[in-house]
Image (cartoon, helix red, strand yellow):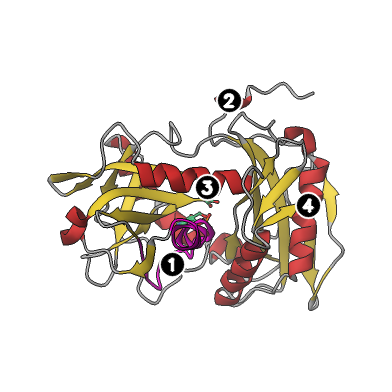
Amino acid sequence: MVNIKWEELGFNYIKTPFRYISHWKDGQWEEGTLTEDNTITISEGSTSLHYGQECFEGLKAYRRKDGKINLFRPDENSKRLNKSAERLQMPEIPEEMFIDAVKQVVRANQEYVPPYGTGATLYLRPYLIGVGDNIGVTPAPEYLFSVFCMPVGPYFKGGMTPSNFVVSEYDRAAPFGTGAAKAGGNYAASLLPGQIAHERNFSDCIYLDPATHTKIEEVGSANFFGITHDNQFITPKSPSILPSITKYSLLYLAKERFGMEAIEGDVYLKELDKFAEAGACGTAAVITPIAGMQIGEDFHVFYSETETGPVTKKLYDELVGIQFGDVKGPEGWVFEV
Ligand code: PLP
Ligand code: COI
C-alpha cells in the first residue's frame, strides 16, 4: 500500500511508477510502451522548445464505492487533443490509442488511484510535443505522445469553498488565436497575470474577451458559469476559450436533469447583477464557487463570500456523483477501466 494522506492532497506533482510513451516518425505512431523513467531526452532543435508546438489534456480516474475505476468522458479529451493538434500542425492520435494509453497508465498505477470517499482522484496528463532536429519555424519531423498521472486533491484551495477571483488586465488569447486549443503557449501567457492574482490573494484571474474587454471569457484554468435569479445556467460562448468538457456536461445536466434553461452566450461585466451564483468549472477545478470578483476598484459578490449557492451545490453533487459512479450518468459518459 502506498503511504499517502489522500485527504490532504493538493494539486501537486507526485512521481508515480509508470507512464506511457509513443514516438511518431515517418507518418506513423510506434507501438506505445509503459516506462518507469519520468524524464525524456529530446533534440535541442525540438519545435516544442522553441516554437511552442505542444498541446496537452487533463482528465481524471475516479475510484468507485465498489473499488472499480471510472474515467469521465475520455473520448472528449481525445477529440479535443486532436483539435489542438490540428491547430498546431501535429499528427492525430487515434481515439483507441488515446483511450488505451490512458487505461494502461491507470491500471499500471492503480494503487495511486485514491480510495473512494477521500475526495481525491487520479489526474492524468496526456501531452503531445514536437521533437527531432529542426531550426526553422516549421512543423517538427517527429513527435512524442505521453500520458502520466498522479493523485490529486482540489486545484483551488478548499475545493467547494467559495473563493475570490480578479479580472485580469491581460489577455490570455487573441480573438482568432489559439485560445480554443489546449496549447502550452496559452498557459505560458497566463503565468504573469496568474502570479499577480496570487500575490493579491486571489485564487486565479478571470480573462475578458480580447476584442472589447466587456465580456467574461474564462478563468485561467477553468471555464466560467453563472446562475441567474430566474434559474438560467449561462456560460460564455467565445472562439478564444477552451471548450471545457465539464462546462458542456454541466450545460447538459442543468437542462436535462434540472429543467433549467442552459445557455452559451455573452456574459457582460455590466450585467453581473443578474447572477445569483457563479462558479469556475473544469477537470482540475471540478466546480469552485466564485465568492467575489474584483473588477478594477469594484468588488462584486455573487451568492456569498462564505457559502455555496444551492444550484451550484446541486450541480456539483450530480456531476461528482456521476464521475464516482454513485449517480447514473447519461449514456457513454463513464468508461470503466
Ligand atoms: N479552461 C482552461 C483554460 C483550462 O485549462 C481548463 C482545464 O482543462 C478548462 C477551461 C476546463 O476544461 P475541462 O472541463 O475540459 O477540464
Ligand atoms: C485541467 O483542468 O485539466 C487543466 O488542465 C487545468 C490546469 C491544471 C491547467
Q: Are marks 3 and 1 in contact (CB under 8 Å)?
A: no
Residue 44 in view: no
Picture disc at residue 7: 2
Image coords of residue 97 (percent x, y): 79, 65
Q: Are marks 2 and 3 in contact (CB under 8 Å)?
A: no
Give the residue type that dot 4 points to. Answer: Lys
Picture disc at residue 103: 4
Quarter of the rendering containing residue 174: bottom left
Q: Which residue is under mark 1?
A: 179
Tell me which residue sits at (72%, 62%) in the image. Answer: 144
Tell me which residue sits at (54%, 50%) in the image. Answer: 283
Image coords of residue 246 (percent x, y): 51, 56
Question: Mark 2 or 3 closer to N-term?
Answer: 2
Q: Which residue is under mark 3?
A: 318
Q: For the magenta stretch, what is the residue range? A: 233-258
Image coords of residue 56 (percent x, y): 60, 59
Residue 13 sits above or below residue 138 on the image: above
- Of the 4 image quadrants, the one containing the N terminus is top right
Give the residue type that dot 3 points to. Answer: Glu
Tell me the SS state at disc 1. Answer: loop
Circle 4 Cα neighbour tier, 10 Å, few/some/many (<14 / 14–19 / ≥20): many
Image side of residue 212 versus residue 202, left or right: left
CA gap, disc 4 and disc 2: 24 Å
Q: Nearer the viewer, mark 2 or mark 3?
A: 3
